[in-house]
Image (tube, helix red, strand yellow):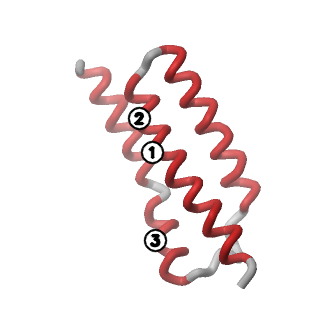
Amino acid sequence: MNFIDIIGLFAGACITLSTVPQIVKVWKTKKVKDISLKTFSILTFGIIVWIIYGILKEDLPIIITNSVSLCLNLIMIYFIITYKKE
């Protein structure tokens, strides 16, 4: 792994981890009233496209960080759909 890959992983990790506080807050409070399903859905679609792009370019930092982001955003979408009913 070269220096450029390390920078890519670090940048991707920062962006990926930015979702974690929101997930933790929703998990604890079970309140999603002010969180947009549309926003997280569009973001998730964009992440899927980034993963495809990373695969086509064979760029491991893009694939890894966006795959983790995809999982976190799917968790958030699940919470929004589940807790909106309450």
Amino acid at dot 1: Val
The alpha-carbon separation of the residues under discs 3 and 1 comes to: 16 Å
Per the image, the residue denoted by label 2 is 64
Q: Quadrant of residue 18?
A: bottom left
Of circles 3 and 1, the one toward us is 1
Q: Quadrant of the N terminus?
A: top left
Crowdedness of circle 2 by 10 Å Cα count: few (<14), some, many (20+)? Answer: some
- Quick one: 26 or 8, which is closer to the camera? 26
Q: Amino acid at mark 2?
A: Ile
Residue at coordinates 57% horizontally, 22% vertically from top-left?
Answer: 53
Residue at 63%, 45% (x, y): give it.
Answer: 44
Q: Secondary structure at mark 1?
A: helix
Quarter of the image containing the C terminus? Answer: bottom right
Q: Secondary structure at mark 2?
A: helix
Callout 2–callout 1 Cβ contact below 8 Å:
yes
User: Between tags 3 and 2, which lies in front?
Assistant: 2
- The answer to whether 53 appears left or right of 86 in the picture is left
State the mark number for residue 77: none
Q: In x, y percent, where is residue 69?
A: 49, 46
Residue at position x 48%, y 81% in the image: 28
Check disc 3 and report the residue beneath it.
Answer: 24
Please give the name of the residue rendered at 66% of the width and 77% of the height, measured from the top-left corner: 83
Vertical comparison of 54 with 20: above or below = above
Label 3 close to label 2 by CB (< 8 Å): no
User: Of marks 3 and 2, which one's residue comes earlier in the chain?
Assistant: 3
Residue type of the residue flagged with mark 3: Val
Q: Give left or right: position of 34 versus 47.
A: right
- The picture places residue 22, in percent across and down from the top left corner, at 51, 66
Residue for badge 1: 68
The outermost residue toward the top is: 57
